[in-house]
Structure formats: C-alpha cells, structure tokens
Amino acid sequence: MIEIRRAATFGCLTDAGVTLRCHFAFRTCADAGRVHWGRLRVVNVATMEAGATFALGAEENTEILTWTGARALHFTGPGFAPATLPPGSVQALGTGDGVNGLAWRAGAQGGGFVQFWFLPDDEGGNPEAEVREACPAQEDGGFRILASGFPEDDPEEEADIIDGAPLTIRASSRLLDATLRAGEGAAYATVPGRALYLLVVSGQVAVDGQVLGAGDAAAISACTSLEVTAREVAYVMLADVGV
C-alpha cells in the first residue's frame, strides 16, 4: 500500500528563525494519526534564518540523522566537540542513555536540514556522533545508503573512511538518497515486514502512477519494492524501517 502525503498536510512550527515542517507529531504539532511510521519517529524539514539555532531538550534512545542541505551547519552538544557540518553532509547522532542541549546553528546566509529520527533496537549506551561528508551520487542514479544498522552494510573498520561508506546506527534501519535527472528512475527492494518512507526534497517524481512534488512524501507498507521516476531533476530520501 502506498499512501501519498502532500506537503500542505504536514504540521508547521516557527520559532526564533527556524521553521519546521513536521511529518509526524512533534512538540506542539499533535497529530494522532501520524505519530510514527514503524520505527521511524520523526521526519522534520527545517528552514533557518541567518544565525538561527535549532535546539533540543533532553532526548534519549533515539538515532538522529541530519542532512545539511546546501549550506553548512554548526553543531554543539554536551560531551561532543563542536563541529561544522559541511553542505550535503550527514550526521548520525545516537542519544543513548540521554543527552540534553543538542543544537544546530545556521551560518550568516541561513540554512536548513532534514532530520530522520529512528528508534534503536536496544535502549541505553553512550551518546555518539559521527559525520560523513558529501560524496558522489551513484553513477546509475540509483539509491545510495547514507546510514544503516545492518551488518551487511557496515563499512570495513579503517582509521579513515573516505569512500562514502554508510554511517553506522543502532537501529535495524536504513536511510538512503538518490539524485535523479529528468526521465531517470531509481528502484529499491526490501524484505517483508518492513515500512518505507519516501521524501521528495526537491524536484518532481512519479511513484505508483502519482506525481509528487518537493515536500511531498509517500508512506509505503506491505510492499517489498519501490520504483521512483523523475519528472524533472529531483533529490529524494528514503527510510527503510521495521514495523
């Protein structure tokens, strides 16, 4: 089953120069029908004014993946070294037993991000953070794994990983992306008992005969395959989670 969710139906929060489009219930955006999608708890798309900061209070037992978009963000948090997240990079942050005061700040030209929050397989553990800088898209325009909790996707243990290998998370989930030229397609196959969530970050695509524009999403269940075709140049992100 594929349920198309239009951008205009998502909640919107604006505070201190940060505007969030919330795909699921988040803070004061309460939506009893959209609390989560399987083990996917949050999808937030943020637009930030110059110097604006998105801050979190106490969070625990959550894997937070942040894609920075076209401009760098500056990250701070207790127990973590301050870091600059380059444009197009992905940060994987596991909150473990708990952390308070995580913050992402935009630079002088503003910025934005997309965040996916996954529920981990096991609770607890020390908070951890890792960043993977932008790497080339797949030559065939297909889906690329950005982060994964599956052993078969785990990069080899090396001092420096420079080949764009996926970030490791503590959840049996994947976050993928694809950059598509007009007319190109991308296919993804999973196994029974999974849920997929597709976000169109930019451009326009067709899924199951329906056209999705920037900000639209598709919630997919009871399907083991997905095909996406670009109607124009498009960038999409895909989450594969347990139910």
Image (cartoon, rainbow, N blue to C red):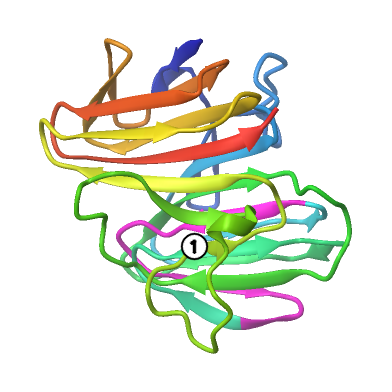
Crowd class of label 1 (few under 14; some 14 to 19; many from 20; radius 10 Å): many
Query: Who's the residue at 32% across and 26% down the image?
Result: 227
Query: Left or right: 93 with respect to 215?
Result: right
Residue 179's spot in the image, x, y percent?
25, 46
Judge whether 38 appears above or below 62 on screen.
Answer: above
Determine the main secondary structure of the stretch shown in magenta.
Answer: strand
**Circle 1: residue type:** Pro
Identify the residue shown where x is 74% and y is 44%. Answer: 119
Query: In which quadrant of the rendered view does residue 156 lie?
Result: bottom right
In this orientation, which residue lies closer to the viewer: 97 or 187? Answer: 187
Q: Identify residue for label 1.
A: 166
Question: Residue 182: where, in percent of width, then height?
Answer: 10, 34
* Residue visible at 39% across and 63% down in the picture: 50
Q: Where 29 falls versus 111 (above or below)? A: above
Q: Quadrant of residue 60?
A: bottom right
| Magenta-drawn stretch contains 14 | no
Image coordinates for residue 102, horizontal then vertical, percent: 68, 65
Q: Which residues are magenta?
A: 62-81
Q: Position of residue 127 (x, y in %)?
A: 77, 69
SS of the residue under disc 1: loop
Residue at horizontal 68 percent and vertical 36 percent from the top = 41
Q: Number of labelled discs?
A: 1
The C terminus is located in which quarter?
A: top right
Q: Toward the viewer: 51 or 11?
A: 11
Locate residue 101 relative to residue 52 in the image: left or right. Answer: right
Q: For this view, does 152 lie left or right of residue 109? A: right
Of residues 113 and 109, the one nearer the viewer is 113
